[in-house]
C-alpha cells in the first residue's frame, strides 16, 4: 500500500479534450519517515510519517527529540499508517508525489466539516411532519422515539445531535493529474474536509521514496522590485556678493542729543 499526507486546496477544473473534469487539488508531501515499527518489537508493521512544519518553539521537547532523528524536529502533523508487510525504509526517507501516477484509484481520508448540533431533518434526512392544519410547531420534530412496552429508548435511535467533525473516507477516486514540481495531486471529484485541512491519500501499489522538491515559481508570478534611484541634492554655495553684503552690515549705535540749557 502507498500513501501520502497533504492539505486540501480549493476545488477547480481541468479540461480533458472537450470535457471538463471537476478536481480537488491536494498539496501532498513531502512527508518524512520519523519511525519504523515491526512485528518483532511492536507486534505490527507500520510507518510513522510527518508532514508540514511549524515554529520549533511550539513543539514540546520530547516530541522535538523524537522527530530530530528524521532531520526535521518541527513537523506539524505526525501520523502512523499500517503496513501489510515489512518495507525497506529508513528514518529520514522522503515520500513525494512521485509514488503516485496518473490514473491511480485512491481513497481519501479526512475530517468532515463540523456543523454543530443539528436536528433530525438536516442530520438524518427526515422529511418531518405534514405542513397542514393541525400541526403546530411540529414540522421538524422527530416524533415518537420508541414503543411503550420496553419503556426505554433503544441505543442507536436516530435523533438530533452533533453533526460533522468526524473521520470520513471517500473511496474509488481517480488521480487526474500530478504536478511533481509543485507537489500537487489533482483528485477527481470532492473530498472530505475544509480548506487547508489534513487529508491522507491511500492507494494500491508499492511505496516509493524520493527527494523533496521545492515548488517552482514561474517568472511571470515574480514581481520585479522597482529600481529606486537616490537623488542627491547639492546645495549651491552662497553668492559672494550676499556674503559681502552681510559683512558690510555693522550695527550702529544711535545716541540722542540733549538740549543745551542757556541761562539768562
Image (spheres, rainbow, N blue to C red):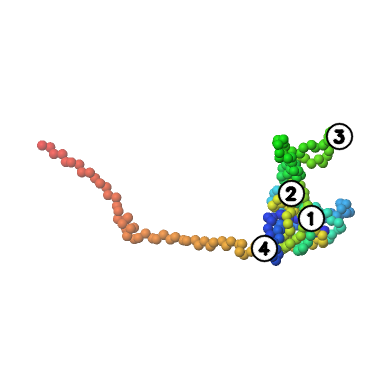
Question: Considering only vertical position in the picture, is 251 above or below 263?
Answer: below
Q: On residue 112, which mark appears?
A: 2
Q: On residue 150, which mark appears?
A: 3
Q: On residue 216, which mark appears?
A: 4
Q: On residue 58, which mark appears?
A: none
Quadrant where the N terminus is found in the figure: bottom right
Q: Residue at x 72, y 60 (%)?
A: 186
Quadrant where the C terminus is found in the figure: top left
In the rendered view, does 90 fall on the left or right side of 8? right
Residue 227 percent across, percent down from the top left: 53, 62
Name the residue nearer the viewer: 44 or 115.
115
- Of the image marks 2 and 3, the number of the one nearer the N terminus: 2
Name the residue nearer the viewer: 116 or 207.
116
Q: Are the residues tagged 4 and 3 within 8 Å (C-beta)?
A: no
- Residue at the front extreme? 133
* Secondary structure category for the residue under label 3: loop
Q: Nearer the viewer, mark 4 or mark 3?
A: 3
Q: Are the residues tagged 1 and 3 within 8 Å (C-beta)?
A: no
Q: On residue 171, which mark appears?
A: 1
- Of the image marks 4 and 3, the number of the one nearer the N terminus: 3
Question: Considering only vertical position in the picture, is 262 above or below 170?
Answer: above
Residue 245 percent across, percent down from the top left: 31, 57
- Number of dots carrying numbers: 4
Q: Residue at x 33, y 58 (%)?
A: 242
* Secondary structure category for the residue under label 4: loop
Quarter assignment of residue 10: bottom right
Label 1, label 4: how many angstroms apart (C-alpha)? 31 Å
Label 1, label 3: how many angstroms apart (C-alpha)? 40 Å
| Mark 1, other Cα within 10 Å: few <14 / some 14–19 / many ≥20 | some
- Of the image marks 2 and 4, the number of the one nearer the N terminus: 2
Q: Residue at x 76, y 43 (%)?
A: 126
Amino acid at each position: 500500500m502507498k500513501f501520502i499526507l497533504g492539505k486540501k486546496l480549493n476545488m477547480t477544473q481541468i479540461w480533458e479534450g472537450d470535457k471538463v473534469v471537476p478536481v480537488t487539488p491536494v498539496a501532498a508531501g513531502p512527508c518524512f519517515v520519523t519511525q519504523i515499527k515491526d512485528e518483532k518489537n511492536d507486534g505490527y508493521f507500520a510507518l510513522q510519517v510527518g508532514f508540514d512544519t511549524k515554529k520549533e518553539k511550539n513543539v514540546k521537547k520530547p516530541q522535538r527529540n523524537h522527530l530530530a532523528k528524521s532531520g526535521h524536529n518541527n513537523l506539524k502533523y505526525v501520523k502512523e499508517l499500517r503496513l501489510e508487510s515489512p518495507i525497506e525504509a529508513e528514518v529520514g526517507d522522503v515520500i513525494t508525489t512521485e509514488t503516485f501516477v496518473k490514473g491511480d484509484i485512491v481513497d481519501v481520508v479526512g475530517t468532515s466539516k463540523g456543523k454543530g448540533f443539528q436536528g433530525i431533518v438536516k442530520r438524518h434526512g427526515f422529511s418531518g411532519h405534514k405542513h397542514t392544519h393541525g400541526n403546530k410547531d411540529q414540522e421538524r420534530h422527530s416524533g415518537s422515539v420508541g414503543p411503550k412496552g420496553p419503556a426505554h429508548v433503544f441505543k442507536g435511535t436516530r435523533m438530533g445531535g452533533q453533526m460533522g467533525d468526524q473521520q470520513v473516507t471517500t473511496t474509488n477516486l481517480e488521480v487526474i493529474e500530478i504536478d511533481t514540481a509543485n507537489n500537487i495531486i489533482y483528485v477527481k471529484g470532492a473530498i472530505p474536509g475544509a480548506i487547508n485541512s489534513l487529508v491522507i491519500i491511500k492507494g494500491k501499489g508499492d511505496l516509493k521514496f524520493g527527494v523533496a522538491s521545492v515548488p517552482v515559481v514561474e517568472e511571470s508570478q515574480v514581481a520585479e522590485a522597482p529600481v529606486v534611484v537616490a537623488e542627491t541634492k547639492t546645495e549651491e554655495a552662497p553668492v559672494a556678493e550676499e556674503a559681502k553684503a552681510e559683512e558690510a552690515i555693522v550695527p550702529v549705535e544711535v545716541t540722542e542729543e540733549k538740549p543745551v540749557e542757556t541761562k539768562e
